[in-house]
Image (cartoon, rainbow, N blue to C red):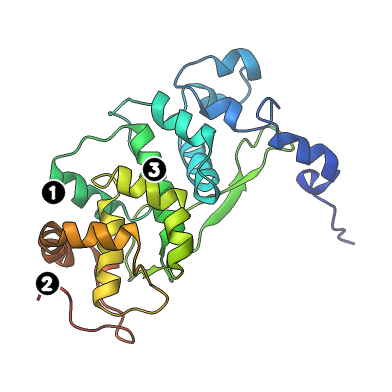
Amino acid sequence: MAKKYTEYIDFGQDYNYAIQNPLNAANPLTYCMVPTLNSQFFHGSASGGLLYGNQNAACLNFMAERCEKEWDGYCQAYTDLNVDTYWPNQASIDTTAYENVKHFFNLKTTLGQDLIRNACYRKFIHIPNMVGTREQFDKTVANSPYITIYDNYVSGYSHVKNLDDPLKIQKDKHVEMMLKHPYICFDILARIYLAIHRNEKHVNVHGTSLETFFSLNDSILKSFIAQAMQFIPSFNKNNTIWQSPCCS
């Protein structure tokens, strides 16, 4: 007779809560913050590829998911410390859109800059037909937390989310980061701009710094969107909400 047992990750809430401590060995921050091999001295050799630098998919997705929820000092430190430009962005959602931006502006982004874009994309853009998979960060550690892995490429349309309250927008750290690094987040900003011109629901940036940005950069946004509509599926229309695009 089959029995259902409680997973170790769910057994002993106090113990698992302790992994939120950034110094706890099970906390992924101890693997992912610094682009060196120092984590080998902390964790030993059992965790395999997770220890050989922090450019792996597990670290990149963990940081994106963590920093989507709150942009704190660890997110900023990761951005400042990780300046290599030759690693692939394995935590990117809608890589087609991001690569289009990098080609449009001739950008070569760092891992730290990729985190800004990955976190902001997760917070402000929703892909209705995309479902992430959940897996443990380090499968060799019993109480290692779960992370969400998404496909890098998007084949359907997108919606803008979490931008319906101008008062909250003005205080939002992720909005601040997008406007501080507009080229890195240009596909997100362009998608928000497109949503406004399509009169999509639940988007209200009136009187905010986003509205100011869109006003000052109207020409370049239209130029980017005009070519993006040919190449980026997530910019395409959903027939139930589509109105004439801004750039036709």
| Residue under the image location 27 percent in, 50 percent down | 98
* Spatial CA span between label 2 and label 1: 17 Å
Check disc 1 and give the amino acid type: Phe
52 vs 109, left or right, is right
Closer mark to the observer between disc 3 and disc 1: 3
**Where does label 2 land, which residue?**
247
Q: CA distance from mark 3 to mark 1?
A: 19 Å
Tell me the residue at 61%/12% (across/down). Answer: 41
Q: Secondary structure at mark 1?
A: helix
Residue that mark 3 sits on:
116
Would you name the residue on which mark 1 appears? 104
Q: Residues within 10 Å of mark 3 (few under 14, many from 20)?
A: many
Residue lying at 38% horizontally and 48% vertically, measured from the top left: 176
Front position in the image: 101 or 247: 247
Farthest bottom residue in view: 240
Image position, residue 66 (x, y; %): 55, 44
Q: Secondary structure at mark 3?
A: helix
Residue 238: give x, y in percent of width and height.
31, 80
Amino acid residing under circle 3: Ile
Whichever of labels 2 and 1 marks the residue nearer the N terminus, that label is 1
